Amino acid sequence: MNQPFFPTQKPLIVVGTISTQYGVKATYSNHLPIDLIEYRLDSILLELNFTEGIAALQRSLQERSLPVLLTIRSKKEGGMLELSDCERSELFEKFFPYVDCVDLEWQEYSKLSPIYSLYKNGGKKIIFSIHSLSEFIDLDKLIASLPDIKLLDPDFLKVAVRIENLRQLKQLTELFFSYPKIPWSLMGIGEFSHLSRIVLSALGSRLVYGYIDKPAALGQPSVLDLKENFQRLGIIAKNQSLPQAL
Ligand SMILES: O=C1C[C@@](O)(C(=O)O)C[C@@H](O)[C@@H]1O
């Protein structure tokens, strides 16, 4: 198995989320305008027999042609599957050899630190993610945690937050200017989801998420809608499917 190239150097990385068994198949049969595939394992496993499903997914991941990001969202953070902390950690361990990048919830770092060490020492990319699904985030609290986050040197710091008005979107954009060295991946959820992804991608957000099979969050656009709008607005060139430079 040749490990697919992870496009770290790209200024904007398009992530296609899959949440269903159908999505897993589509990923291998289509040419999608994405750089990275997000496996929402907490959702994909819902439809499968647990043990057989894990083995089948591991087999298909061995054949992957794009880098894969593993996400196993806890129920508290909007995940679909009821898993104990121990079961979730075991899943992270089982999929370690088959993926290129992992999403770890910063709020749950105390439980996930062995998984962080496993992936970091194994040379995988790390996304720390912070969510606030139902309301705007407490930015002071986020800013207070930046020194601890920096010590762990993640490849990306993702903040996915409910945005209810343009003032909140502006507040989020200010993070780029106040902390320019952080590899931010910022996005809105809800009514301003699509607009926020356009604005934040144009300003330098490193990862932009769209869905391949079905929305994984309120208002999440499809990767095809993202591509169309990015091309129309000049964020990516018209003759390119993927962004090269901002
Ligand atoms: O955290 C994120 C971002 C997301 O919630 C979105 O809004 O696109 C989709 C999730 O699957 C992913 O893990």
Image: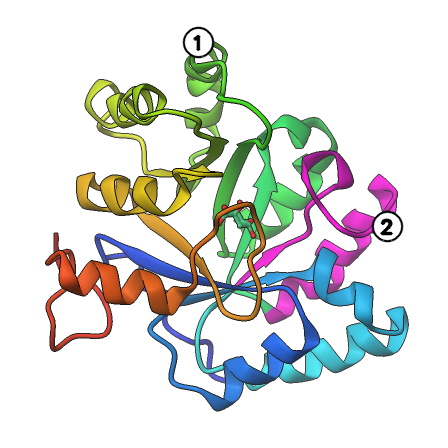
For badge 1, the amino acid type reads Asp
Mark closest to the chain's N terminus, 2 or 1: 2
For badge 2, the amino acid type reads Glu
Residue, disc 2 = 87
Which of label 2 and label 1 is nearer to you?
A: 1
Residue range in magenta is: 69-98
From the top left corner, tell me how far across and down residue 236 is, in percent. 15, 62
Element type where label 2 sits in the image: helix
Q: Is residue 81 above or below residue 117?
A: below
Q: Is residue 221 above or below residue 52?
A: above
| Residue that extends furthest to the bottom in the rendered view of this protein | 29
At 60% from the left edge and 42% from the top edge, which residue is drawn?
104
Label 2: how many residues lie within 10 Å, few (<14), some (14-19) or many (20+)? Answer: few
Inter-mark Cα distance, 2 to 1? 33 Å
Q: Is residue 142 above or below residue 240?
A: above
Residue, disc 1 = 140
Q: Is residue 53 visible?
A: yes
From the top left corner, tell me how far across and down residue 78 is, in percent. 68, 41
At 28% from the left edge and 66% from the top edge, which residue is drawn?
227
Which of the 4 quarters of the picture holds residue 22? bottom right
Element type where label 1 sits in the image: helix
The label shown at residue 23 is none
